[in-house]
Image (cartoon, helix red, strand yellow):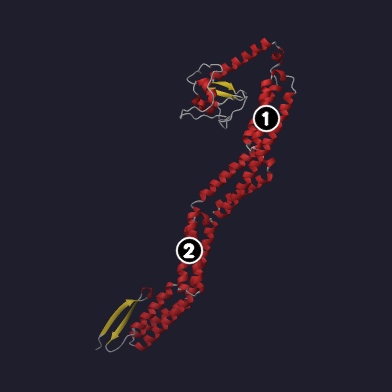
Amino acid sequence: MKVVKIIAYLFCGGAFLFSIVACGEKVPIREMADAKVAISKAESVKADRYAFEEITAARKGLMESHSFVMKDDQENAAKQANAARIKAEEAYTKAVPLLAKDSISTAEKSLEEATDAYAENLARFEYQKAVDGIKDANKKFEDKDFYNAHLTASAADVEAKKARDIALGKKGILGNSIADVNATIDRAKKYNALTYAPEQLKLAEENVSIASDSLAKLHLKQGFAAIEVAKINADEALVRAMKGSSDAAIKEAQMYLDKAEKSPNVASAGTDLALARESLKSAQEFHQRAKYDDAITAASDSKRLSLLVINARSQDIAKAGVGEKEKTTKEIKKSQREIDLERGYTIYVVRYIPERRDCLWRIAEKYYGDGKKWSMIHEANKELIQNPHLIYPGWRLKVPLEGGAHKKVQGEKESGCDQPKDAERTTPVE
């Protein structure tokens, strides 16, 4: 009777191969183990996809080797095991370059998506690692180091996907840029950019549209490129529009000043006329310094003052005697003052005093006895006063009541606008 020893080991696919060792007979364990290792290696490079016929033949040969062992035909068992190993090696050799090529292709596609997401700027570290990895993988492929080319490309693919995800996580930057450029476009339109900068305005709007569409499709690189073009043109449109509007406002103010100087009422409105000239001069200076907002404001004030001269007081006041005219004017001012006080403020008209110009500090001292309270007046006139350091003759400023009343005004006795040594004071001085 033969003594039979059964050795079990795991076979590919989950099946068990039983090698039977009979007394005095040698089972081809080594040959079968080598075949199994070769099959596993081929499977690791996706031989089922790239070398299906070869890997199938290898598995079949190993199974047949097992059958010969069961029949005590060790010679044929060894032959079939060797044949299975050879087929498995053929499967690996055929599959590994194809796998490497596909891995590189996958990584390159992921890099393209990262590039489209503007990862080269928004995720530079991860993006560069992906670029370097793909370059290295291609070098290994050329050197026929296919398996390492596959591993390197796979690692590069991971970095490229990471770079894309990081970049997309920053898409809010593009959204904010689009909002900023839209705000600039809206402002340019208010300054009549359609007239003064139609081409720049059109380019800005077209590229904002492209950027918005790109953001929706997550094509961030295209979006950032478009918004950069939009920003350049929107800024240019705004500057041209402001310059054009400023120039037009100054010309209009000059026209009204010319009319005012020829007005029959000029003799009784000398102060307003002088203020109109001063405001126009300021507008022209601001325009030369490219401070177009201030120029437009000053020109508008000059126009308003010129209109006061042109549209003189009512004919009845003009014909009245000097005493009657002063009386009527006082009654009008008194009535208006009462209305203003009921609203919680009084009106102060900024004066034209070249040697000692009005400023918010002096006005606060006059009404509150404390120049440090200038900010109360600034807050009440924010729509008019864009720069607290600049107020213009003729402006009618609201002076809020403090505690229901103002300090009794002491005529012209008031401190100057020079900075005192007191460190707490912060005053706008012109």
Who's the residue at 53% across and 46% down the image? 176
Q: Secondary structure at mark 2?
A: helix
Residue lying at 67% horizontally and 33% vertically, measured from the top left: 284
Residue 182 in percent (x, y) is at 59, 43
> Along the line of sight, which residue is nearer the eye, 10 or 372?
372
Please tell me whether residue 83 is drawn above or below residue 107 in the rendered image: below
Mark 2 lies on residue: 157
| Residue 101 in view of the camera | no
- Left or right: 406 in relation to 331: left
Q: Is the residue 255 above or below the residue 79 in the image?
A: above
Q: Amino acid at mark 1?
A: Leu
Disc 2 crowd rating (10 Å Cα; few below 14, some 14-19, many 20+) is: many
Location of residue 153 in the rendering, given as x and y in whole percent from the top left corner: 48, 67
Q: Nearer the viewer, mark 2 or mark 1?
A: 1
Q: Are marks 2 and 1 in contact (CB under 8 Å)?
A: no
What kind of residue is marked 2? Asp
Above or below 100: residue 218: above
Give whichever of discs 2 and 1 has the lower sequence position.
2
Left or right of residue 4: residue 193: right
Q: Which residue is mark 1?
A: 280
At 56% from the left and 44% from the top, the residue drawn is: 179
Q: Give the Cα separation between the discs numbered 2 and 1.
A: 66 Å
Quadrant hosting residue 272: top right
| Of 249 and 163, the residue lying toward us | 249
| In front of the other: 358 or 59 | 358
Confirm whether residue 115 shows in the render.
Answer: yes
